[in-house]
Every structure is written in structure tokens, then in C-alpha cells.
Image: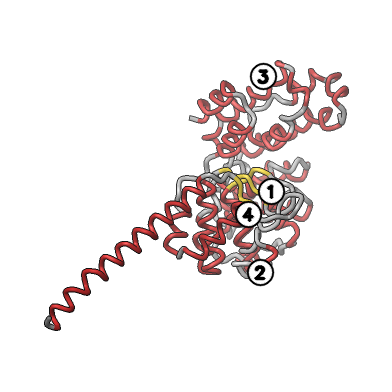
Amino acid sequence: MTHGDTGRDTVGPVRALALILLAAAAAHADDLRTELAALSCVDGAAVSDDGRPGRFYLLSKRILAQGDAALFARLAADERPVTRAMGLYCLARTEGAKAAATLRQHLGDRGRIEYMPGGCLVWTTTVGAFARELLLNADCIAWREGGPRPLVPEKEHLALELDVLARDECTDLHENAARAVRDAEPPLDRRKLAALCPGLEAWQVVKALGRTTPRPELRAFLQRCLKDADLDAAARRAAASALTRDPSDASLAALRGFGEARFVADAEARRAHDARMAPVRAETTWRGMERIRKKVVLAFTAEHPLALPELEGRRSLAILGHQDVRAALVGSFVRIAGRAPDFAEPWDTYGDVRFRLERIADGRLEPDERAQVRAALR
């Protein structure tokens, strides 16, 4: 046998072996995907009463050991929310800070997952919310392995939270992001904020801050922005939109001075909503709510998205079992949905109305009620 013949004899078996190994690897990857597809909950290293590892966490250990960045990226692009969550988790654990860009792209991912990072509590959240958790701590469900291990430097945390607050599609993340911004106590000076958040436009920073809880120092900042001739029109309108969330006389006076009628109308709508809602807020018992049922119907009648946070939060009240109360609430959702195009400008602090209503519709509304809201959104 010649040397050349030997080469031909060995190349064939080597290639065949390689193909066999590739096929085996593909089959194994398919098995992992099948197991992953059966999961509905992202559960961590120590869950339930006995602190045992969750199924998601155990499967992640196998995928991390046998996969690579390409596989993790494919998982992150999968159509199933839990599979996307697994891909993001594996990228965060293996790629570290290099995964931050991919995680940021998924902040607006509204796929719903059950989340149980540790202990006995489980709740419904979004893939986007999980991506935010990973940016702040790549070990968020593996806390027994160490951590926290942030993928974003601490000096960039404020910019991350303001980016979340400025994005309408991230509405499910807004509450936690707003709390983080309040806790950070950022300087309410637009030039200092620009230095801390170089990747955000001025209107994004103003809009984001405007979505946090109204307070005197924030009101003063927004009023300064309203009068700041160096700010572009989008930033000043973002400030005006934010001031309509503050029911104070000072904010209403500032908006009247700004000279755009829609903002004055929005501020007056908020004051009217607060007046209608006052007796409902004051009642703390089911019997008391029954006594003021007509006032509840009136309070639940709205057509502006400013009412959504409170209406959504009060859907679970027992009094909603009354047809007239429920009809008022659903009717408000439908009317607000019909006005969604009025709040579509990028700077508008009510621009998340469509995403809020979709969450409400897919949450606890009945199929016929859901259809009404979705039809109005179209």
C-alpha cells in the first residue's frame, strides 16, 4: 500500500467519525431543547420549602457545560419565552460584560414567564425583566455560587434604569426602575445627568425621570426644563408631559405658562380623576366600597391613560363582581385604547398606553372584554 493510498483510507473514516459526532451533538442539543420546551418557570438554585435546585437551574448547568456562545445565542432568539430566558442566562454566565449588549436588546422582550429566583415565592414577569436582573447580577438565580456579579458597572446603573424608563415597551419594568432611580438620588441637573448618561438624548432623560413618583424637587427640575431655551422641543414637551402627572397647582400654572393647550387639558384631566377617585381611595373595606358603589362606577369611568395604573391596580376588588362596576372599568379600557394614537410621540410619558392595555387585556379580562380592548387598539 502506498503512502497516498494510506491517506485515502484514513480520511474517509475520520470524516465519517466527525459526522457521527456532529449528528450526536445535534441530537443531544435537540434533547436539551425538548427538555427546555417543557419548562414554564425560571427557577433558581434554591427554591421551595426544602431549598432544592429548580428544574430550570439544573438544566442550565447541563447546557452551560455542553453548549457554546452560538447555541446560547440561538436559544435567546427562540420563539418560546423560557427558552429565550435560558439563552440570555447562559450568555450572561459565560460571556460576562460582552453579553450586556444582547441583554439590553431584550429589555423590551414582553414574553411572559413564571419567575422563582429563590425561596417559595413565584410570580409572572417578562423576559425583559429577567434580562434587567441579569444585567444587574448575572448570578441572580445562582446566588449560592457567589455574587452579585453585575454586568454593568455601578457608574452606569443610573443610565440603564433611565433607559428602561424611557422605553415604552419596557412598561413592565418601569416600577422597579423608578424605585432604583429614586434610591440613587441622581442630581436633578440636566448637564450633570447628560454626563452620567452619555448614550441618552435629553428628551429620554427628562421622560424617564418624569415617570418616577412626583415630588417637589422633581417638579422644580421639570419646570426648569420647561423654560430652558437650550433644550430642544422634544425635551421640553417631555417635561410638560411629566408635569401633567403632578396634580399640584404649581405644575398646572407652569403648564399654562408653557402655552400648549393639550398639556393643560391633561393636567386638568388628572385633577378631575383624582377628585372622582378620592372616595374610593379613602375606603378600605369591602362593605364600605359597597356603600359607595355609584361613586366607584364614576371613579372607574375614564378616557385618559393617566388613570390606568390605578384602574389596573383596583381590578381585583370584590366589588368588580357587580356588572355595572365591571362594565365601567372595561369601558374605560376601551375608550383609552381608542385614544392611544394621541400619545404616540416618542417624548410622551403616556406613550406606553398600548403596552399597558395589552398587559391588562391578556391578564384577567374575559375573552369578550379582551377582544373589545384589542379591537380598539387596532
The mark nearer the N terminus, 3 or 1, is 1
Q: Toward which corner of the image does residue 324 lie, by quadrant?
A: top right
Q: Toward which corner of the image does residue 110 lie, by quadrant?
A: top right
Separation of residues labelled 4 and 3 (CA atoms): 36 Å
Mark 4 or 3: in front is 3
Q: Secondary structure at mark 3?
A: helix
The mark nearer the N terminus, 3 or 2, is 2
Identify which residue is drawn at 45% across, 59% down: 73
Separation of residues labelled 1 and 2 (CA atoms): 20 Å
In the visual, does 5 lie left or right of 335?
left
Query: Residue 302: horizontal and vertical position, in percent?
Result: 67, 27
Question: Nearest the camera: 319 or 171?
Answer: 319
Q: Which residue is mark 3?
A: 327
Question: Nearest the camera: 267 or 136?
Answer: 136
Separation of residues labelled 3 and 1 (CA atoms): 28 Å
Mark 4 Cα-neighbour bin, 10 Å: few <14, some 14–19, many ≥20: many
Q: Secondary structure at mark 2?
A: helix
Q: Which residue is mark 2?
A: 154
Q: Of the residues shown, which amino acid type is indicated by label 4?
A: Val
Which of the numbered marks, if any, corresponds to residue 153? none
Q: Toward which corner of the image does residue 23 lie, by quadrant?
A: bottom left
Q: Of the residues shown, which amino acid type is indicated by label 3?
A: Ala
Identify which residue is drawn at 78% across, 50% down: 215
Q: Of the residues shown, which amino acid type is indicated by label 1?
A: Glu
Which of the numbered marks, if any, corresponds to residue 206? 4
- Examine the rendering and report whether any part of residue 171 can be seen: no
Query: Residue 53: horizontal and vertical position, in percent?
Result: 66, 56
Query: Residue 304: horizontal and vertical position, in percent?
Result: 64, 32
The mark nearer the N terminus, 4 or 1, is 1
